[in-house]
Amino acid sequence: MNSEKKRLYEGMFIINSGLSEDARKKTLERVTKLIEERGGVLKKIHEMGKRRLAYEINKKREGFYYLLYFDFPSKYILEITKELHLNEDLIRFIILKAEEVLEVLEFKSLAAQNY
């Protein structure tokens, strides 16, 4: 019986905007497969679309943003992070512990918030 401790995580992944749609889908599939191969279970994927980066990263100004929620064994977080760093199609990513899965995301630009 597998009694590994799993936690809920959220991961923000920014994929290179210069990729074709098929290549972008394959990159996302590689990320999800990596999660599932280590015993993770995907809960929700939010495709946030193409957005401008706050600053240039590796000569890139835009990227496709994806927010993933997944249950994952805590002992494999460091291992999966190392493997994700090897994926050249990912501009940036971050994985954090989450309290709950957000079903709906609301995005507001800073200009719209009247700062």
Image (tube, rainbow, N blue to C red):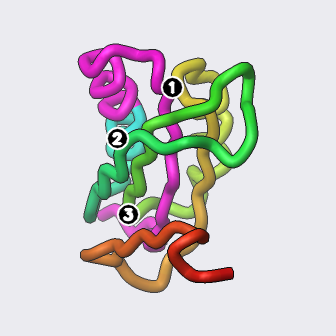
Secondary structure at numbered mark 3:
strand
What residue sits right under mark 3 in the picture?
A: 69
The x and y percentages for residue 75 are 60, 57
What residue sits right under mark 2 in the picture?
A: 32
- Residue at image coords 56%, 81%: 113
* Label 3 CA crowd tier, 10 Å (few <14, some 14–19, many 20+): many
Secondary structure at numbered mark 1:
strand
Vertical comparison of 81 with 9: above or below = above
Asked whether 62 falls inside the magenta stretch, the response is: no
Q: Choose between 92 and 29: the one closer to the eye.
A: 92
Q: Amino acid at mark 3?
A: Tyr
What residue sits right under mark 1 in the picture?
A: 16
The x and y percentages for residue 6 are 44, 69
- How far apart, in angstroms, are the residues tagged by discs 3 and 1? 21 Å
Among the 4 quarters of the image, the one containing residue 20: top left
Secondary structure at numbered mark 2:
helix
